[in-house]
Amino acid sequence: MKHLIDIKDLSVEEIDDLIEVAKDIINHKEKYSHKCDGKKLATLFFEPSTRTRLSFEAAMMELGGNVIGFSEASSSSVAKGETVSDTIRVVGCYSDIIAMRHPKEGAPYVASIKSEVPIINAGDGGHNHPTQTLTDLLTIKCEKGRLDNLNIGLCGDLKFGRTVHSLITAMSRYKNIKFFLISPDELSLPEYIKRDVLEKNNIEYVETKNIEQYMKDLDILYMTRVQKERFFNEEDYVRLKDYYILNKLKLKKAKKDLCIMHPLPRVNEISTDVDDDPRACYFKQARYGKYIRMALILKLLEVK
Ligand code: NCD
């Protein structure tokens, strides 16, 4: 049985297959509408979510399956003191696959050790978010036509942004990728990712505080929200939250075919005047999320 805890649980070939299946689903939805008849997905969300939870649920419904779960820890027995391991063992009796989000780094991994059904990490603290990365890879493949030869700018909260950590890990396996890490010093990419992912694989990267410095070089600009919930004090958050606000003016030197991405939710980091720019891909990106999650559910349930 296979779980998805870290994006590296999937080989590059497996990711390519998921992308191909997702594209086929987009073009032939009707072929897939009964693939998961009689199956149940449980969504256990111990942290807030809109896109991830609802796209998982919509994905299972469009495959003909059903959904159970909770969207707040306070409405489950966790509020009574139940451990993650016990919750998972029980939910596994009622469902065929579980998507789980938790504020503690490593909680989905702990859950997977005891689970009798596949576990999908839907975000663990400031650590990883592999299904957002699958969404991002499908977006890049569809919008740019390739996953190699790309200059990728990542801007905002690179320290706590779990989507950034998983995306860097995934993209580091493709050819000729260069990263432009754009953040204030206090929110720079954790050392362990620089060392174990970028330097270990000889991936080229530069760090800067200035969003405009490399704008003309970028093929992708991945904006992120400052992760308020991971800060120890409000003051630091308030000082850093509006450090970057992408607007039309800042895009002046950008390539005509730049792809602007954001996992969403956006707070202030992309001005709404960018939304009508044909290079803005973030709402399309949210749509792609459902299709790649459909492909993932099929794979983990071993549905042909
Ligand atoms: C992201 C997350 O939860 O990490 N959201 C998402 O899943 N699309 C990004 C964020 O919350 O900033």
Image (tube, rainbow, N blue to C red):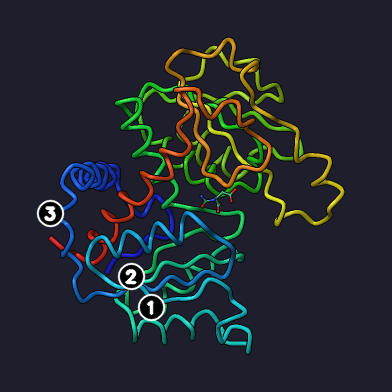
Task: Report how far apart the C-alphas of labels 2 and 3 lie in the structure.
Answer: 24 Å
Compared with 41, 207 (above or below) is: above
Q: Disc 1 and disc 3: Cα gap in Å?
A: 30 Å
Label 1 sits on residue: 115
Across and down, in percent, residue 284 comes to 41, 38
In the figure, is residue 263 to the left or right of 37? right
Q: Give the quadrant of the C terminus.
A: bottom left
From the image, state whether disc 2 or disc 3 is nearer to you. Answer: 3
Q: Are marks 1 and 2 in contact (CB under 8 Å)?
A: yes
Q: Percent x, y for residue 265?
A: 58, 47
Q: Quadrant of the N terminus?
A: bottom left
Residue at left offset 44%, top offset 22%: 278
Total marks in image = 3
Q: Looking at the rendering, which quadrant does residue 32 occupy?
A: bottom left
Task: Left or right? Give the position of 297 relative to 27.
Answer: right
Callout 3, which amino acid? Lys
Q: Earlier in the sequence, mark 2 or mark 3?
A: 3
Instruction: Determine the image quadrant of residue 5.
Output: bottom left
Q: In the rendering, which numbered label is found on residue 31?
A: 3
Circle 3: is it few (<14), some (14-19), or many (20+) Cα within 10 Å? few
